[in-house]
Image (spheres, coloured by chain):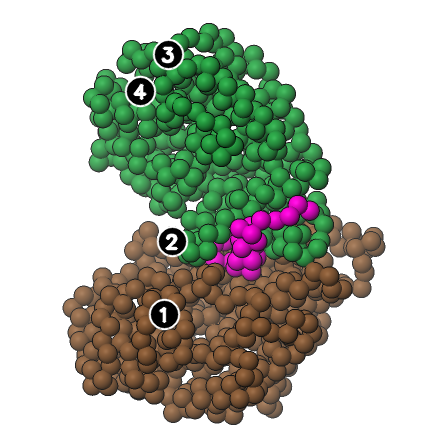
Amino acid sequence: MKFTQNSYMFDMVLFELQDIAGKEHVSTRASDKEVYSIDYFWISEMWHDRQAGRDITRPMADFIVHPANAEEVSKVLKVANNYKIPVTTWGGGSGSQGGALPVFGGIILDTKRMDKIYKIDEKSMTVEVGTGIIHQTLEWELEQKGLSTMHDPASARCATVGGFIAHRGTGVLSTKYGKIEDMIVNMEVVLPTGEIINTLPVPKTACGPDLNQIFIGSEGTLGVVTKVTLTIHRLPESRKFRAFIFKDLSTGLRVGQRLISENLQPSVIRLYSENETKEVIKKVLGIEKTGAYLVYGFDGKQEMVDLQMKYAKAIADQEEGEDLGTELGAEWWKNRYKFFFPPYMFHLPQCFGTLDTVATFSDIENVYNAMKEVVETRYPMARFIGHFSHWFPWGCMLYARFIIETPPEDPHEAIYLHNSIWNDALRAAMKAGGVLNEHHGIGLKLSRLTPELYGNSFQIIKNLKKSLDPNSIMNPGKLGFGV
Amino acid sequence: MTKITQNNIDTLKACRYCPMCRQSCPSEFISYRESDAPRGRAILLHSVYLGGKEFDSSAIQAIYNCFLCGACKSWCSGQELGGYDIPELIKFARRDIVSHGLAPQSVQEIRNSLVENDNTRNLDSKLSCTALVVEKTADVLYILGEGVNYTNPEIAEAFIRILGHQQIQYTLLKDEPTSGKELDLLGYRKEAQEKAKNMAGRIKAAGCKTIVVSDPLVYDALKNDYPAWGLKLESEILHVSEYLLSLIRSGKLKLKPTQMKVTLADSEFLGRNNGIYEAPREVVRASAGENFAEMQWHHEYLQSAGEAAFTFDGSAFKRGEELGRKISIKAEDINAEVIVALSATAKNNIAATTGLRVMDIVEFAANLMV
């Protein structure tokens, strides 16, 4: 934006946006600008929290636009290109990486009006939806018909489907049903220059590269996904869980790896490190045990689930797990969202972050140990905890977290400490075979480290960005692209 | 700004960055604005009470856009332990806004109407259905509330038919005054307490054993606000659904079976604030039996009917219909033929958006009594 709110050019652009979306769907109100300046990223929260008595300001959007469909999105992007105005797409604003923050001002494109369920196809087992729908709303509608996407993250209640696509989200049932990218059949996308495209009707083709995969995980830097067709499933006849305490994390990891490699097809495996078992499991589930808590779950036809449960227990017994029974497993399922509500969730003034990463079974324990060591030795004021909750045929995800009870009061010093921990922990992870992130995305938080992760292959991504978004208007400052 | 209480600070700090209840908030999914969600409102209020900012007009508007329906509390898994209470925080902020002379013009107009005419819509009390009442001594005092008194006299007529049929002596209050509830919800506590004092005096003067109330807002005021303000009422206070149920249980009131599929729209002020969920269901089941069906959202997860939605966007009562439409859709989803409502507001908001029969619970009972 080259013009300010007291310039008539501001009103000229505002008028164009109002003409596209309707006056009531474009806001320049101070309250909206304030609320859209904070997402679930710790730094944006901390900056807001520490504003009293300080001369600090937050980056804010100039316009907040609520388009109704792809056509309106297209027109907004054409206006933005005409005037080279940054555009940041906002779904539920529940991302933890700062991906939805309008750090260079401009337009916030709030997608939540695009919340229609267009078609539920019970023959093909797909659902076509606007990407602005809150995921839980979609799930409730599907549930009425005995269906589900089986995408079940903690953020289901507050995030949009588009938000999941933007950062490659995952849910607690991912071990059986996959991450969001495994659930996408086709998409409608508005390119940065305003063209509306559709990806091929089905994804498993031999017709060249899969266009879906260009936009999945692009965090609003390569376009705006406005509609998507997702796979759906019938709700299972049976869903059972069983919990164990293993003597240590290594044993728990071996059990998880065996549940996968022995083809038992669990829908859930969650293994908590010894210190997270002590800190978090005790708080939410009231279990006071020493060791590593592991819960697994299966779903499907009753008889099959019973068989899977039987073979899984045999593995756990062989590894000398202390059986906590099915009730404590079911208790975890019942409370699976509770961990993310206050007062259970970490919150300011604490400084905290989720260092999720993913690696092969051969590397994952080394990744955990490397991150733990670097955090605990270089930052003695920080606690390090972790759990392993999304499992693949070749490895699993580590959901590591650091928590500092009393970070520096000065917001600049707090950011320096926060970023230093991220840099050190993730560099240690990458050195040990991990990557920057598994399902929260890059956003602003990890943008600086992205070229380091990709090395010389980052040029391919940069070229793609330049080709699709020649004026670099889409979500500047994110995903390693800068401005 | 007024010094904020510790409970409200706890709510501010818990809710300001937490979006976990947002899917439940009816006001956000009318405007689609983040500032109309609990998180948004908490962020704005944090800036004022803990961030040293002044209220600006758009933040004030966001505070008045809340329906005070309490859905955020029902959907908060940390509420039981943390005691977070967005509706209380919003009411506190509204009182503060009022005390600093910052209430929006539309709110001030509603306040003036309530103070001068005892209704929110600046209507002459001669137009109310209690205008010609001659008060008498009776065991039962029936309090209508503004909706029934001014816009839905058919609800009062239905209840009076039941009382007549049962040969129950009753009285009404001539020119029934406001309970003060709406004033309190708007942030005018002093004026609300004055009105409450007046209403309590009128009730006491009537000398009835039992007060039966149609309007959930009035019921909530008599049950919760009046005792908190030191206004003690000796009489038993019942919502009409509770009173009807007592008549049914005692065998005095019998309802014919209906073959229609009937559903019930819960009331946020009866349900969430007072735990009244089962009495209206039992009344409906007394006639509908197996033909009673729940909508997708009921009991504490009810959909707001907009009982306190009289300030949204400054357009008094307009947004309520959008809430009514959401309930209508859910009733149509289950192929209901009749929607039973628990307030005049709910009846009107729902009826405006569906071809299904919508009736208040007393109309339901009156139509089917034997």
Which residue matches tag 3? B138
Q: Earlier in the sequence, mark 3 or mark 4?
A: 3
The quadrant of the image that shows the C terminus of chain A is: bottom right
Q: Label 2's element?
A: helix
Q: Amino acid at mark 4?
A: Asn
Q: Badge 3: how crowded within 10 Å, few (<14), some, or many (20+)?
A: some
Alpha carbon distance from label 2 to label 1 = 30 Å
Whole-percent x, y for residue B229 in the image: 52, 32
Asked if the magenta segment contains residue A89, the reply would be: no
Alpha carbon distance from label 4 to label 1 = 56 Å
Q: Amino acid at mark 1?
A: Lys
The quadrant of the image that shows the N terminus of chain A is: bottom right
Q: Amino acid at mark 2?
A: Trp
Asked if the magenta segment contains residue B4, the reply would be: yes
Dots 4 and 1: beta carbons under 8 Å? no
Which residue matches tag 2? A140
Q: Label 3's element?
A: loop
Q: Amino acid at mark 3?
A: Ala
Residue at (42% x, 49% y) in the render: B74
